[in-house]
Amino acid sequence: VDEASLIAAAQQGRVDAFNDLVLAYQHQVYNLAYRILGDPAAAADAAQEAFISAYRHIVEFRGGSFKSYLLRIASNACYDELRRHKRRPATSFEDFGDGEMDAEANPALVNGSAGPEEHAERAEMARAIQVCIETLPADQRTTLVLSDVEGLSYEEIAETTEVALGTVKSRLARARGKLRDCLRAQEELLPARYRLE
Amino acid sequence: MTMARWFTKRDREHERRDELLSAYLDGQLGAEERARLEAQLASDPALRVELEALRRTVALVRDLPRVPVPRNFILPQTMVARPRPVLLRSRRLLAPLLTTATSIAALLLVVVLVGDLLSAATGRRLALAPGAPAAAPVEQPQAVVTTVQVEQDAGTSATAPALAMGAPTEETPAAAGEESRLDQGTLVATPSPPPPAPATAGAAPEEGTSAGSAPPQPAAPTFGAVGTPAPTPTQAAEMERAASPATVSAAEGAVAATPSLPTVEATVTLEGYSVSPAPTETARLAPPAGESGEAAPGDERLEREAGAAGHVLVSPRRGLEIALGLAALALGAGAVWAWRARRR
């Protein structure tokens, strides 16, 4: 069954059709939320909120990219979540190496060929990046995640975040610049091969 | 340069640089910009370092592991009846509603405009002597300005203008009524109470006073303050004739209501003017002697003030027309928005 007919069926009120769309996109939506919010539980809440909201408003969807439609609702749900909790970064550098088992540290995530040491390094690096992402303002954070985590084009990001292309470009540049500076500042914490210089 | 400003400037330069480098990494630079940046990169090792650091940063983010979903986010069958958000439902109704409202506002506007034009035409026909050519309809505000000029040219003293202003703002119905009386060559006293300050001794005879019994408008005192020397009678005549013929009815209304016009003759004069402007007759509008000689310098100022008055004075009907026009525009814009939102 193609996406268009699932959407049409969902617009007729068929939850099962919509749930097929949920299964197709939940990974993307959850990852977006996780990278923006930095907290698995908050990300799960935001993703669930996003799907409920997407279903409630699905009659308003009039063609275009369904992914953009969904990711827009998801990033709005993340903004709401951020506003609600005025979240301080969920991850912090103090967490490093305290053996906490979060998503990043889950061995099942990592390439099976990697040794335990490399896996640990990767997890450490991922956490460092996440901490730095969370220092960004919400709009830059979302733009960066949509671009470099979700792999959306500038045009898709513009559609998703409902801003002009030029704004996408400058937000992304600022986000990347700050991220680079943040990672530089943490360089001594990072494994040598992940350093920027 | 202060430290803070130096930092701000440097930050801006860095931002600009990062923007170029970031777009370059994504292949988003135009050919010209790209060539310029590549030339810079070739000659500037520090810039190459920055580009490399940014490239590594982007690569690190892209390499972030995908986190597995902790659970399925499918919606329970029980959860949802047919999704029909309130907002959407109202929006569906909104578009046709707004369209209807726009039509009604536009229709009302047309009705008021036509009524206005018709009554203006009637008033003019009554005002003009039989057989006089009907003048083309012209913007009303102009008429107001002319009126002010006439009244000021007549060299009225401080009290008179207050009364004079009553007529033009009241517009056609009142003016037409008085004009029709003028038509018969007489000024009929209206039953309304006498004007508040007919104190200009000698300047306003009985007829003038009673004809000018239109209620004074709040805007009037502005003109009451104009105690400047009036132009010479000939200048006044010229100014009057310079005004479009269509403004005559309003001007006459004003004259009818102007108590300061010395005699019945004045009315006759204006009637004469409206049919065939005769300078000699108009000259009889002359204010009491002594005021007429030194007019020239104040002339421009009078006109300017009169112009300003034209903006201030908006009759209720004109106000209604403007309001209706704006309402129709706003509703129309809303309707367009609602239809678009519906299509989305």
Image (spheres, grey):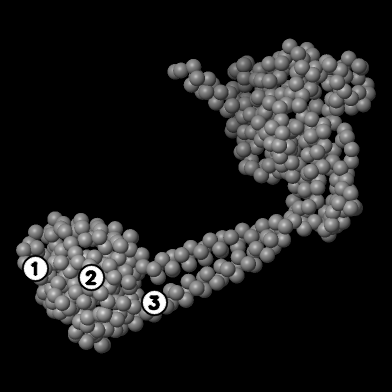
Whichever of callouts 3 and 1 sits on the residue coming sooner in the sequence is 3
Dot 3 corresponds to which residue?
B117
Image-based side of A75 in relation to B147, left or right: right
Helix, strand, or loop for circle 3? helix
Front one among A149 and B332: B332
Q: Is residue A97 visible?
A: yes
State the separation of the CA atoms marked 2 and 3.
Answer: 30 Å
Quarter of the image where the N terminus of chain B is located: top left
Quarter of the image where the C terminus of chain B is located: bottom right
Whichever of callouts 1 and 2 sits on the residue coming sooner in the sequence is 2
Dot 1 corresponds to which residue?
B288
| Circles 1 and 2 on the same chain | yes
Dot 2 corresponds to which residue?
B195
Query: Disc 2 residue type?
Result: Pro
Helix, strand, or loop for circle 2? loop
| Circles 2 and 3 on the same chain | yes
